[in-house]
Structure formats: structure tokens, C-alpha cells
Image (spheres, rainbow, N blue to C red):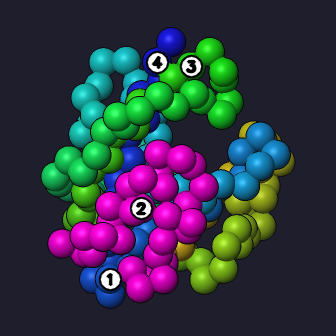
Amino acid sequence: MFNIRVYGILITSDHSVLVSDEFIRGNYYTKFPGGGLEFGEGTRECLAREFMEEMNLKVRVGEHLYTTDFFQRSAFDPEHQIISIYYRVHPEEPIRVPLRSSVFEFDEQQMAIYHATGETETFRTISLTNFTPESVTLPIDKVVAGLIKNNGAQ
């Protein structure tokens, strides 16, 4: 079975990369914002919906950056193969969610969500100068992080 994921690369005006720090199923992950494609929606629609759900942020989905071109088994379900699609995204309004300065800096509300659902997330930015493939956790994200690092904020 295939699991299609869609992620957005948002480079801020101060040349930083937006990442999501998440606590899911007892593990910590730093990844790009985005999520799973739902039946009946296109990839760009999915990404706009995910940014609205996760950050209450309206974005314009820009150029396609990368689609998985190797086999990647899901970390959560070994019967699923992950296909991830990455686009550049541009905020159409100011980012209003708190952007954290430390890794996995969850506030009380985010921890309450964790206790209710078993997962939570927060957001932060990493300057392009300091951003590397090691800045993110997931194997496909590491490939994209390398592309971003090599191409800068173009």
C-alpha cells in the first residue's frame, strides 16, 4: 500500500527554513510541515489544507521541488511505502503561531494536546547558514534538506 505525503518548504524573509518539531507515538521528529494526501484532493490542495490546519496559515503553493525516487518503508506501518512530494510554499499572511527558538519546545497547550491525542507539534525556523540534512529526522526530508542547502533560498 502507498502512503502519499505532501510537504512545504517555506523560506522566511530572513533566510530561515520553517520546520515542525513533533512528538508522535513516543518519538521526536523534526520534519517539514505537511501531511497526508486525503482521497479526492490534489497535492497542492493537500498542502494548503495542511498549513491551514497545522498553522492557521494561508499559503500559496509554488514550484515542485522533489518527489521521492527511491523505496522508503513507513516508519509507522511496515506494509506501507511512502511517496513524499515537496513544494516551495509562500505565506500569504504573517505567521501567527509561535516560532520556537529551541528544539521540541512545547508549551502547556501543546502538551495538553499530546495527553489527549498522543501527538503534538510546534514550529521553529533554522537559518539557512545552520540548516543541514542533519537538521531533519526523516530519510526523504534529509534528501530535500540537501537540495535546499545546495540551492540556497532561490
Read off the residue under disc 1: 15
Note whether 142 is above or below 2 in the view shown: below
Disc assigned to residue 80: 3
Quick check: 54 left or right of 69?
right
Q: Is residue 107 above or below residue 114?
A: below
Mark 2 vs mark 1: give the one in front: 2
Q: How many marks?
A: 4
Q: Quadrant of the C terminus?
A: bottom left
Report the mark closest to the observer, 2 or 4.
Answer: 2
**Amino acid at circle 2:** Ala
Task: Magenta stretch: give its range.
Answer: 126-154
- Residues at discs 3 and 4 in contact (Cβ within 8 Å): yes
Q: Amino acid at mark 3?
A: His
Position in image of residue 153 (x %, y %)? 25, 75
Closer to the chain start, of discs 3 and 4, is 4
Q: Quick check: is 30 in the magenta stretch? A: no
Residue 111 visible in the displayed image: yes
Q: Which mark is residue 69?
A: none
Q: Residues within 10 Å of mark 4 (few under 14, many from 20)?
A: few
Specify which label sits upstream in the sequence, 1 or 4: 4
At horizontal 79% and vertical 55% (from top left) the residue drawn is 112
The secondary element bearing badge 4 is classed as strand
Task: Work out how far the residue at label 2 is from the one at label 3, CA to CA, in angstroms.
Answer: 23 Å
Quick one: SS at disc 1? loop
Three-letter code for the amino acid on which mark 1 is drawn? His
Earlier-in-chain disc, 2 versus 4: 4
Neighbour class for label 3 at 10 Å: few (<14), some, many (≥20)? Answer: some
> Which residue occupies 46% across, 18% down?
2
Instruction: Of the two numbered discs 2 and 3 on the same chain, state the one appearing first in sequence.
Output: 3
Q: How busy is the neighbourhood of tag 2: few (under 14 within 10 Å), some, or many (20 plus)?
A: many
The residue to which callout 2 is attached is 145
